[in-house]
Amino acid sequence: MSKREQGFTLIELMIVVAIIAIIASIAIPNLLSARLNANESAAIATLKNIASAQAQCQASGAIDTNNNGAGEFGFFSELSGAQNVRSSGGAVGSGTERVAPPVLSAAFGNVDGSGRVLRSGYYFRMHLADNAAGFETENTASAVDPANSEVMWGCYAWPASFGNSGKRAFYVNQSGDVLACRNNTAQYSGTGTVPTAGTAAYVSAGAMTGTVAANATAADGERWVVVN
């Protein structure tokens, strides 16, 4: 048996390792980019689904805490049927009825203590309005104003890990238009750096009645554009 038949030479092994390293240096960035794009596309689709769910909930009158016959928008755990809807002046779960059938996936019933839901590498947080049109989150829901929640809501989505699970941040409200920012300035990421006070995607800090920064620079320094 010749020496070549017994195995690879050291030079041959080094060539193979070098080729594998070159292939990996090309493939790994492409795989990461594909994952980021997939997560961002999923976040956009989820926000559009949330907008549809809110419209269904409001139109059906499933939530009507002031009993005036006009439906109100809801939080994740209400839309998903995970908890009872709000009562007048009460927090999520304080009422006696649920949205049935649910208009949002049951996965959105898993809301953390700061009103966030984690899905496909992105955090989502819903806002409803208080009596001054301020931004209330699910964990402070007792301050939600019935009249304002009949006409206003907003939801942010940002990467669980900036640069790893996604880059862009997104926002949608009752208009149904999904906005996106490159997230280079604010770099919203995980549970640390998040869109604060709800006004990140608005032209100026203030209330939910303010002007959303559609194709303009917002209060957070990011330029938000409408996603088609």
Image (cartoon, grey):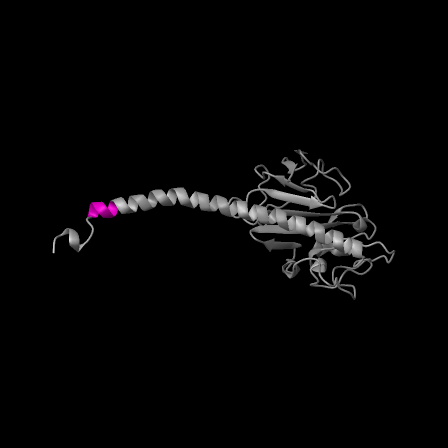
Q: Is residue 196 among the parts visible in the rendering? A: no
**Quarter of the image that includes the N terminus:** bottom left
Q: Is residue 12 among the parts visible in the rendering? A: yes
Task: Give the residue drawn at x 72%, y 38%.
Answer: 212
Q: Is residue 70 left or right of residue 187?
A: right
Is residue 111 on the magenta stretch?
Answer: no
Position of residue 141 relative to residue 96, above or below, is above
Task: Give the residue drawn at x 61%, y 51%.
Answer: 123
Dominant SS of magenta comes to helix
Q: Position of residue 49 (x, y in %)?
A: 67, 51
Q: Where is residue 113 in the image (x, y as percent from the top left)?
A: 65, 57
* Front-lying residue, 195 or 172: 172
Quarter residue 213 falls in? top right
* Front-lying residue, 79 or 124: 79
**Quarter of the image that includes the C terminus:** top right
Judged from this view, the residue extending furthest toward the right is 68
Judged from this view, the residue extending furthest toward the top is 216
Position of residue 62 relative to residue 171, above or below, is below
State which region is magenta. 10-14
